[in-house]
Amino acid sequence: MACSWIGETGVRDTAGVRVRPLAEEDLDEADRIFRVAFGTFLGMPEPEKFSGDADSVRTRWKAYPGAGLAAELDGRLVGSNFAANWGSVGFLGPLTIAPEYWDRAIAQRLLDATTELFSAWNTRHAGLFTFAQSAKHVGLYQKYGFWPRFLTAIMSRPVDPDSRSGSTRMSAVADKDLSNALEAVGELTGAVYPGLDLSREIRAVRAQWLGDTVLIDDGAGLQGVAVCHVGAGTEAGGGACYVKFGAVRPGPGAERRFGLLIDACHGLAADRGASVLVAGANAGRDRAWRVLTDRGFRRDFQGVTMHRPNEPGYSTSDSYVIDDWR
């Protein structure tokens, strides 16, 4: 779990706080703060063990150079935030502040800088995932124009090694052919939502050996894509395959294509030795949610996605998409 998280009230006490790019030498401490902040909020007896052997800090810092932000006070790192650039779409998090610095409005300073990044990227639709039950979290993000819209469940089911479909993987694409493959993915995701671009996520998975990207092609062109993290040291964690983003071409036959994509993810997970397949289901994409539950996925926990502007983006009934913006 790597939800966008803030421990804040509306009180302004930011004198001396410096927001700057997160540096490589900050990563160990940023990871520690991330775990302790979440673990403390969730009441874990050993907060530092939150998220186990999964890694959301280093992977995102490497994927989006310059989009990791540090909050520093008296020369000490006290918090961080990350932003992801999916072309016309962007999302933020995890945003975490060391517990001993909660309620000093430090997260607001990080949010100020994050929204500036979205403006520089010309982000059309921005979002985040947070705790639905927390009025404090939802209220603070609303101050920045984000509106709570959709319940979003993180679901999982045991990997079925027999659930496979005809697919290829980005790891099999030669370097010289990568640009063409990414162009095909961009055309597909652009059909889901204008300007939606997952190329940075795909390149990050490829460069960091985080997992693989599954491609469904029926001979008439690319019909589905799923960007997956697998195993320890990734956003999935040991024993898991996490579908960070998955989508199929909209239109007639989309539900069938979505089933094939899920089967292909099972195949990747089985080949990589994962025992659990994890996928995010957004309630605005009710048909995709039902396909997942019909195929045995059950919710592990849930939150709410918040959107700026207050529009659905690609979270509509006819979008067969997997993601959760954690």
Image (cartoon, rainbow, N blue to C red):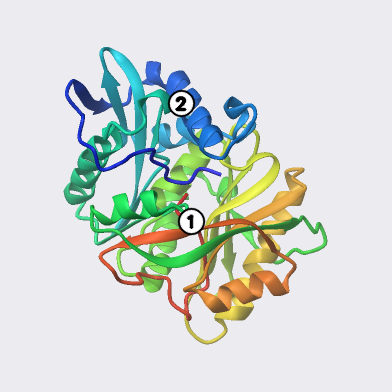
Q: Looking at the picture, does residue 169 appear above or below residue 72? A: below
Q: Nearer the viewer, mark 2 or mark 1?
A: 1
Mark 1 Cα-neighbour bin, 10 Å: few <14, some 14–19, many ≥20: few
SS at mark 2? Answer: helix
Distance CA(mark 2)–CA(mark 1):
22 Å
Q: Quadrant of residue 86?
A: bottom left
Hey, which residue is sitting farthest right in the picture?
A: 162
Q: Give me the residue at 45% from left, 53% from top.
A: 325
Q: Nearer the viewer, residue 14 or 302?
A: 14
Residue that mark 2 sits on: 33
Q: Tell me the quadrant of the picture where the N terminus can be found.
A: top right
**Residue 288 as seen in the image, left or right of residue 98:** right
**Residue 324 as seen in the image, left or right of residue 197:** right
Q: Give me the residue at 47% from left, 46% from top.
A: 3
Residue 116: % across, % down: 18, 44
Q: How many numbered callouts?
A: 2
SS at mark 1? Answer: loop
**Which amino acid type corresponds to the residue marked 1 in the rendered image?**
Gln
Residue 179: % across, % down: 40, 51
**Which amino acid type corresponds to the residue marked 2 in the rendered image?**
Ile
Mark 2 Cα-neighbour bin, 10 Å: few <14, some 14–19, many ≥20: many
Q: Give me the residue at 43% from left, 37% from top.
A: 60
